[in-house]
Image: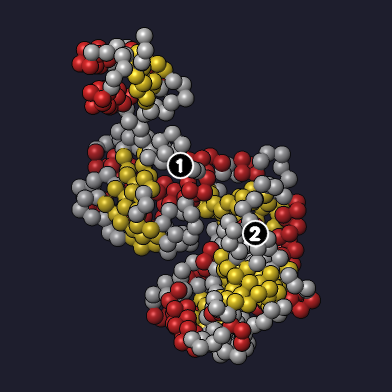
Amino acid sequence: MANKQIIINDMPHETRVALVEEGNIVELFIERRGASDSSGNIYKGRVQRVLPGMQAAFVDVGLSQAGFLYVNDINTENYEEMDHFLTENDVGDEIKGQNTNINSKNSANRGDVNIVDLIKEGQEMLVQVAKSPMGTKGARITSHISLPGRFLVLMPSSNHIGVSRRIEDDLERARLKEIVAQIRKDQLGYIVRTAAEGTTSEKIAQEMDFLKNLWCSIQLKYQSSHAPCLIHQELDISLRAVRDLLVHEAEKLIIDSRSGCQEIVSFLDTFMPNLKDSVELYEGSEPIFDAYNLEGDIFRALKRKIWLKSGGYIVIEHTEALVAIDVNTGRYVGKHNLEETILKTNLEAVKEIAFQIRLRDLGGIIIIDFIDMEKKSNQEKVFHALNEAFAKDRSKTHILEMSEMGLIQMTRKRIRQPLTRQLCSACFYCEGEGHLLSSQTICYNIHRDILRNARDMTGGGLTLKVNPQIAELLLGEESHIIAFLEKSIGRQVTIYPENSFHLEEFDVLENFGA
């Protein structure tokens, strides 16, 4: 843990969590108020209606609409093998392979089971939200509870020990499974998550104790509560930072909210009291993200073009299928020879590329187009530098060697939505295209459109409504277009600037009457 800190800006409308490594922000998490996401929350609910024809039930959990419960989502002691809900937001798809086998067995066992034999109206039960309410639809719920941690997922209704299928090394899989089997002192089920790869038994034991304590507190609260009520709320972003980062990634947490600080200390006092001294309240007059020089990095992470200190730059294009990154020398001309200039630019770009990918949380297929280098040794230097730059990345990456064309292809596991999609929306002007037709092209398109429709016009002259910028061009530099048009169709064309028009928008009106 080399000088890693968690900086939290906790405001009434928004909470931002930054993981800072040696003074540089490397990961950013944002949670905004208002969007009521109940996914992962655990409730004590009461069955309102049982629908045998649909093999489902409506359960009142205290939300505006009753939750919807399918028969296969019911956990009961009458069955030895149950399927297990895992919140996709928290656990991802890393263990879908584990669940597929269990679910297929479960379906076979439950083929002839009627839901009325499992639950009845008025019955109280512990349920977890699998999918938040959407519009008029209530939440999708399950009674297969799962509690995700950083390294483990606790599944109280199972005694199965599984390992994420994304951990491919057989020896590592066996090692992790053996650690959990030796540490476990009960019959609770666990799935070892991808993040546990290479983790020590001490850290896994610490998290197992945390999850067991959490499950015990949920059970106690269920016994003393009246349905419907919320039993356990999925951790907010600050507490998730404590759970996922402070325990394993950072040595200090600094937050600018007194109430938020007290909540974190209380959380640690219950589950990890030895870490309470790691939390510090920021009381400076300057905004906390400004004090730690983080705002500038966040602003740069929203840009398409990133300048390097030497004068070179990188361009990041995020498409649906992949991310393309282009490296350019820009204003950097070097001091000695071309090959040295290119190598220096590429090596500087490596650090910025790794920084931007982690901060933006770019994932999937990533293609990096470095400036072509003639020497194989220089290509290897860039490749090894890129691997080294991603060594500290918490997301799993796989980097292929540089091709003859100077391209490096890599894959990176996506943890959440890219930063630009969290903080930005499509441009209302270009509608997300990222470019507009040039003014000259628009003028020529108008010319062609009028010629195309001239034969169907029956009025006198024409009024052409356009954006003011286009009007200025048609009355000035491109006025010859209008002159040629009037001669071709035998009608006068009047240009009318319309302030409300999009740059590419135009309207042709016929003038009727005297």
Where 385 sits versus 312, above or below? Answer: below
* Residue named by callout 1: 426
- Which residue is found at the position 75% from the left and 57% from the top? 262
- Which residue is found at the position 52% from the left and 45% from the top? 423
Residue at the extreme front of the image, as rendered? 513
Viewer-closest of 468 and 330: 468
Label 2 crowd (10 A; few <14 / some 14-19 / many >=20)? few
Q: Position of residue 133 (x, y in %)?
A: 59, 61
Q: Quadrant of residue 68?
A: bottom right
Label 1 crowd (10 A; few <14 / some 14-19 / many >=20)? few
Q: Looking at the image, tell me whether mark 2 or mark 1 is earlier in sequence order.
A: 2
Where 331 sits versus 443, above or below? Answer: below
Viewer-closest of 344 and 220: 220
Disc 2 residue type (three-letter): Asp
Q: Which secondary structure, mark 1?
A: loop
Q: Quadrant of residue 186?
A: bottom right
Which label sits on residue 236? 2
Q: Which secondary structure, mark 2?
A: loop
Q: Position of residue 52 (x, y in %)?
A: 58, 80
Q: In screen coordinates, is 82 left or right of 439?
A: right
Q: Position of residue 334 (x, y in %)?
A: 30, 35
- Which residue is found at the position 47% from the left and 78% from the top? 99
Q: How many marks?
A: 2
